[in-house]
Amino acid sequence: MRHRKAGLKLNRTSSHRNAMFRNMVTSLFKYQQIRTTDVKAKELRRWADHMITLAKRGDLHARRQALAIIPEKQVVHKLFEDASQNFGSRSGGYTRIVKIGNRKGDAAPLSLVELIITEKSKKKKTPKKKIKAAPQKASATDKKEPSSVKPTETAAKEEPHPGEGQKTGAKPASEATSAVAEKNETPDT
């Protein structure tokens, strides 16, 4: 019987196995996801959940226990700082294992292990609607001035670039408007 013998051997010595999982859990918290084989991913989940539980506890003893497993101080500091925000409302199941196919060389089944981070939902800032200015009433000087603007000036502003949207043989817009303007200015006899 195999009572009280939790964990997988993975055909490694205990020192090799512990070193491997210490490095894997450090990489998981550093990069938020890692790619490994299915069997290692399932065992890594146990290590990662234990570290997050220690981080949620947050006291000095828990920090020292985490430092005994995770060798990088920066990773432990970041884990303890963000644990209550990222995992506070969750009571387990901090990691997700996604199967991603087989490895090319030996056809070992691979998985992606990633942290499930639940960030507090912040209120989204809705963009304020721009208030359009009310149309202003035309003054007496504006009513008298429209004849002072030359038709060629307005046509030059609205004229498209040569070759855009024009049919072959058609007059450009500036020539057509100048011909209409000349017709209007010349008195009929």
Image (spheres, grey):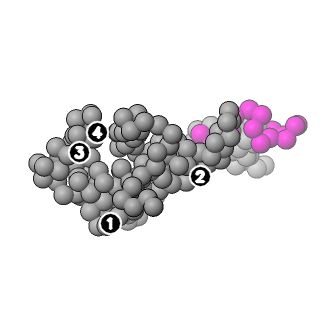
Are the two marked residues, 3 and 2, in contact with CB atoms closer than 8 angstroms? Answer: no
First-in-chain label (4 vs 2): 4
For residue 60, say whether it is visible: yes
* CA separation in Å, label 1 and label 4: 22 Å
Say which residue appears at 68% left-offset and 33% top-offset.
105
Q: Look at label 3 and name its amino acid.
A: Ala
Say which residue appears at 23% left-offset and 45% top-offset.
66
Prevailing secondary structure of the magenta residues: loop
* CA separation in Å, label 1 and label 2: 23 Å
Crowding near the residue tagged with mark 3, few <14, some 14–19, many ≥20 C-alpha atoms within 10 Å = many
Q: Is residue 76 left or right of residue 187?
A: left
Numbered circle sitting on residue 90: 1
Residue on which the image places disc 2:
99
Q: Look at label 1 and name its amino acid.
A: Arg
For residue 151, say whether it is visible: no
Say which residue appears at 70% left-offset and 49% top-offset.
184
Place residue 21 in its image quadrant. top left
Could you say which is closer to the camera, residue 163 or residue 136? 163
